[in-house]
Image (cartoon, helix red, strand yellow):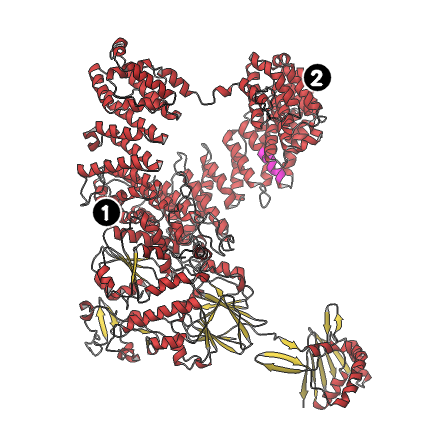
Amino acid sequence: MKLYCLSGHPTLPCNVLKFKSTTIMLDCGLDMTSTLNFLPLPLVQSPRLSNLPGWSLKDGNAFLDKELKECSGHVFVDSVPEFCLPETELIDLSTVDVILISNYHCMMALPYITEHTGFTGTVYATEPSVQIGRLLMEELVNFIERVPKAQSASLWKNKDIQRLLPSPLKDAVEVSTWRRCYTMQEVNSALSKIQLVGYSQKIELFGAVQVTPLSSGYALGSSNWIIQSHYEKVSYVSGSSLLTTHPQPMDQASLKNSDVLILTGLTQIPTANPDSMVGEFCSNLSLTVRNGGNVLVPCYPSGVIYDLLECLYQYIDSAGLSSIPFYFISPVANSSLEFSQIFAEWLCHNKQTKVYLPEPPFPHAELIQTNKLKHYPSIHGDFSNDFRQPCVVFTGHPSLRFGDVVHFMELWGKSSLNTVIFTEPDFTYLEALAPYQPLAMKCIYCPIDTRLNFIQVSKLLKEVQPLHVVCPEQYTQPPPAQSHRIDLMIDCQPPAMSYRRAEVLALPFKRRYEKIEIMPELADSLVPMEIKPGVSLATVSAVLHTKDNKHILQPPPRPAQPTGGKKRKRASDDIPDCKVLKPLLSGSIPVEQFVQTLEKHGFSDIKVEDTAKGHIVLLQEAETLIQIEEDSTHIICDNDEMLRMIRILRIPLSSKLRCLCLK
Amino acid sequence: MDPECSRLLPALCAVLADPGQPVADDTCLEKLLDWFTAVTEAGSSLLLLQENPCLVELLFHVLKSQDLSSRILSFSLRLAGIFAAQENCFQYLQQGELLPMLFGEVGPLGGAAWTAPAVRSGWIQGLRTLAQHPSALRFLAACGAVDTIFSLQGDPSLFVASAAGQLLVHILDLAMRGPAEGHRSPQACDWPACAQKIVGHIEDSLCSTAVPQVTQALSVLTTAFGHCHGLWTQGLWVRLSPLVARLLEKDPVPASHSLVDLLLSVARSAPSSYRGLWETLAQTLSHLSPTQAGPLALGILKLQDCPQALRTQAFGILLQPLACVLEAAAQAPGPPGLLEGAAGNSMTVDTLLSSKSACVGLLCCALAHLGLLQPLPQRPSPWPQAPLLGAAVTILRLCSGSAAPTSDVGSRLCAILVGCGRVQRAALDFLGALSQGTGPQELVTQVFSVLLEYLVSPESSSMSWMPVGHFQRLLPRKNEVRCSLSPCIPSPSYTPGRGRGQAGQLTPGPAAPLFPLQVLKKAFQATLRWLLSSPKTPGCCDLDPHTQLFLRELLPVLQKRLCSPCWEVRDSGLEFLTQMTRHWGGQAGFRQALLASEVPELTKQLLRDPESYVRASAVTATGQLSSWGLCATPAGHECPGAQQESLLVELLHILSTDSEGFPRRAVMQVFTEWLRDGHADVAEDAEQFVAGALQAASRDLDWEVRAQGLELALVFLEQLLGQRGSHCPYAVALPETAPPGVLAQALQVLCRVQLFEFAFRALFDCDRPVAQKSCDLLLFLRAKAAPCGSPQEAGDSPNVASVEATLQRWQAGEQGQPLGYLEPGAVVALLRSVDLEGLRDTLAESSDHVEKSPQSLLQDMLAAVGVLGENEADCY
């Protein structure tokens, strides 16, 4: 069993598991942090951004000044933003049989894989994952496509040139594999390959393994996966949460007794408690708005925003913010708000019960009804007519490189009354803000990451007790900035196996058993004999038939009819035969009896030596050495002697008999 | 005993002796016993029994009856004890062989009733009361009671077991005090047999291998040394101290808690008279584990006179855990002798690293012990203020994860402590206590920075590391029960794990969500203590530059906290602001910083907070800010009159419209304070102000608001007529009367503000504290008004009669009719005509004074079983 690690990002995983005869891709995350190296795409012409000076080398050479721009001491690529794809060279991706998606954030690289690698398999995901994933992709494509950029920078990617660039461009990895965003057509094609699944549904893959999605509690439709055969079980835990926010709670019990547990997608901010972060969010929001400032919340169109809106729903009246408008701007804002209300079966119990009242499960419906929350596809159109300040704006993209958020950063950045509050943990806020410097606006970092933290993980592992844990290497050591925090790493026994990008891991467990079915008529013919209390044995002669990874023992083809009658007769005669054979079938070899038998067959110079594990019987004349151990018997002899020996050895032999022939 | 009680007693005894007539409740029996105790203390028990033979009959009957309830049996045993406490009565009861039958082996002791803990307890308490004289000692010896008491020491009922131990001490003391009181030699050989027996038993128990037995012996000794101070206790110590010392040789030391209690009890009584005590204490300190030794060390350090070496040793033990933390967290080898003599020893380090609970327990104890020691006069000197500050700061940093220890022990400590709310609270408390001393500026800066870290950090909550509440948890919840003393009630909105009803295995304890909030509160408290103790710049009355700097960083944090979605946080923030303003309202630096911030404006906005506690705190805070001229103004200037007026109007509005009591009470308090302190804008037109406040308060449904209204009225009165004079009830000085001119004028004013209507209404208030307060106020006024006019003059006033009639109706509960405008003359007349003293005496009596008499007790008990026939119900 092997694990191919195609992504180095612990929360945006992309791994391929080779298990039995199947090749399963686990998640398909797209690392978008590469976009932080690019200049923002302004929705409205920004004189500030378009007038940034070009960057030149120390020696004054300015050949890169078209591609690279300098802003407050940082250098950015002036081009269409590009994303860092999973490894495509490590394994032939056309051989991937299936892709299992754990949540909508972890499928953003899907079009790259399904459309450009010769992939012919199936993708499995839950309905909310697909629908919301589609929204995220749609938004992304829309954000990028609506600001067409004439030039595409590639000169800087040249390895020799890259070396000369300042950090972080200099240190960017795999730049040659960075790709531009996919198109809507590719998205549609990729999504058409998805087959919808429900929690606990069992999906057979070629008869070899069975995969099952389980609720992971992190997002609408988010799942962990169980991949199991009859005797092996691999759990894939990705982006799980024990907090009862809006999704169904996490199913932990089904993860028990795994041979291997692959653990990804833990919280990115292990020191921040989501609750206190929401407290901070509300406090800062209220503080800004009371002072007449505006609040900008860069966010994804789904996920935590539902919780934030729910909190604000309860908070605004008490904080005296009822008159403050909340705007949600995204090409998919409307669909996202509506979708969230229809996935009742994927919601937590409290929200599910509301549906039967019937009430909308999320209170943002009421916010919309009472005109406190308004949503728009973009800043153009209706929004500009309704826009009132001070206000609170939720909009994407959290990287601050594209989307309507760029406009608000430009608009509000100059006033210290305004505040930008970062709630999404995916991007380092300082890097996100770099191209907007100098910035007068206040910045608050309240990352809300409800995924498992290390304490929860260690309790989870104690509870489900997997034999082996596999995780990204980032989880096996304290964060680099807090090297003393040994509590911020996975602590389990045996220690977790770690992987990094482009690594292939041989998983430390061997398949020992295979399930084989016996046809009823063959089973009928077996005559088990009890060799010791509770253990019975029978010899089987059969044909092993293997198809679709199913093994069936069928009765051997019958010989010609005339002999059939005889055989039946012989079958009845077999019973005394078997009784005679009984001592031969199993058990340890009684050495004395064995020596006597050998003597009877004319061996005279028999020497017996005791060893730590058993005995060695030496027949010098016959140049034969018989090694008898608890679970094996080796006969080392001349080729000619072999048959004779085996005949003689129709005496008790243990399970393994190996013959070495000496010439 | 009064005749009526004597008359009722036989019937009562009959009821008690009748198993078919169950007595209502135990409280009656307890009250009855209290009454008998009082009666026998006042007179002869013998006489009582002779005059009321029913009592002895009751005791005899109890013995004979088989099916009596255990509580009657227990009651009888205790009753017999009360009577037999007097020697002549003891003899009298002995004649009838009653006592051996009650307390001896033939009594309940051998019977089925003995299984009831109440009976065993009654037996012990009876003997305890009885054992007051030598005859009793002989009786105890004769009936073999001591052996029974020995066995009761291990009784499953803790009450019985503890009472048995105390009885043993009492008997021992009685035996040793005996006839040769005071001269009993410390030598044990000539002790009375009874004492020998008890001491022998204690010796056996001390040598026992069973820990419970050792514990029993130690607790008996603890009581003995704590309560008995004869010469004989020295003898007892001489005899038993080797056995105690032998306990220390065992590993682990058995019953270490009890041992510590004993040693401290001996050391507290008269340590110099117990030979070898200091050595034993020193030995014990070194033998016990760090966790066990803490309480002993604290006890030793609290002793008045104690050898310096022992004190040093004890102090070292308290300091050890902190020394270990300091050492482990040190970036580089620290300056030598940080905590001299307490360099972390390996045992302490082992304890700290052995488990989270051990580490947390040891640190919390050490911090609490040192915190207790800090303010004591006998605290060790020199007090290592600087290293202790350093340790407290380090612990807080380890808990918040902001420390970066490089050593292995440090990292492990960090992993254990990070996010530990208990240690954080203990450390913040300790840090607060340390504010009483000074420290090097560098350390003080560190203290302020760690406090700021805790106040800023939203992780004063995420430190708990618990999968606590979904986001809604932080938001105020409607219909939640809250109480001002324990304002942090967790809302059960969120269950991590598997959803409702299934708390999942990862669920933290139910108290988990409380931690962060308490940590924040403690951080506020500690900050306040440090701020208030921060030194003033020499020669200048303003704050020192460091504090100024800190304030500038603190106020934005406070601002944020005032906007918190969690009402407890807003409330704590406001309380903190109130305290800070109260102390520093006059400091220019503070005023400047505060006015430059948005805190005053936010505070004012919180007057409309949806949470009543927050509104109340906001009222108090705004009141305080306004007293110092710091309330919010749009331009950030100090408030001119117009602004002030609007605040007054706003507070009056709250007083008359707020649906909850707390904000209204707070408003009245602020008003009283304003009036007392002569708040500029109130003083401008005090009359109108008082009239408005009283009018609003008089209609209030909350009695505390009305009572506070009277307080306001009193302050107003005092300002008009002069102080109330001495508050001492025993003062002989008569109240000074006001000069007639002043008085007449004042009465006019009081009439105009309708203070009398308010006060007289309050006089007949259904809530006693309000009525009492009003009575005091009117008495004060009457004393002041004594010479003013003659009764005739007043009597002539035309409307007095009708006013009196109105008052009578009020007293009868019809308070609808207003009093109407009163002339000053009529007021004086009224004050004289109403029997205020009588009213005061009536009000002073508690509401159950009528029911408290023994007679009513007996009647109640009889009525409860229907003997009096009054409560018989007619079913048809």
B559 over B57 or under it: above or below: below
Q: Predominant secondary structure in magenta?
A: helix
Q: Is residue B788 above or below residue A203?
A: above
The picture quadrant where one finds residue B410 is: bottom left
Give the mark nearer the N terminus: 2 vs 1: 2
Q: Amino acid at mark 2?
A: Gly
Q: Nearer the viewer, residue B688 or B325?
A: B688
* Quarter holding residue A590: bottom right
Q: Amino acid at mark 1?
A: Ser
Residue positioned 50% across, 49% down in the render: B358
Q: Which mark is residue B597?
A: 1
Residue B268 is covered by the magenta coloring: no
Can residue B136 be seen here? The reply is yes
From this viewpoint, which residue is outermost toward the front?
Answer: B876
- B777 sits to left or right of A193: left
Residue A492 is situated, as x and y percent measured from the top left of the image, at 50, 62
Provide residue B177's location: percent of width, then percent of height.
Answer: 59, 22
Is residue B167 toward the left or the right of residue A453 in the image? right
Disc 2 is placed on an element classified as: loop
Residue that label 2 marks: B96
Q: Relative to A378, is B198 on the left or the right?
A: right
Q: Are marks 2 and 1 on the same chain?
A: yes
- Percent of width and height locating residue B577: 29, 41
Examine the rendered structure and indicate whether residue B711 appears above or below residue A215: above
Q: Which residues are magenta?
A: B212-219
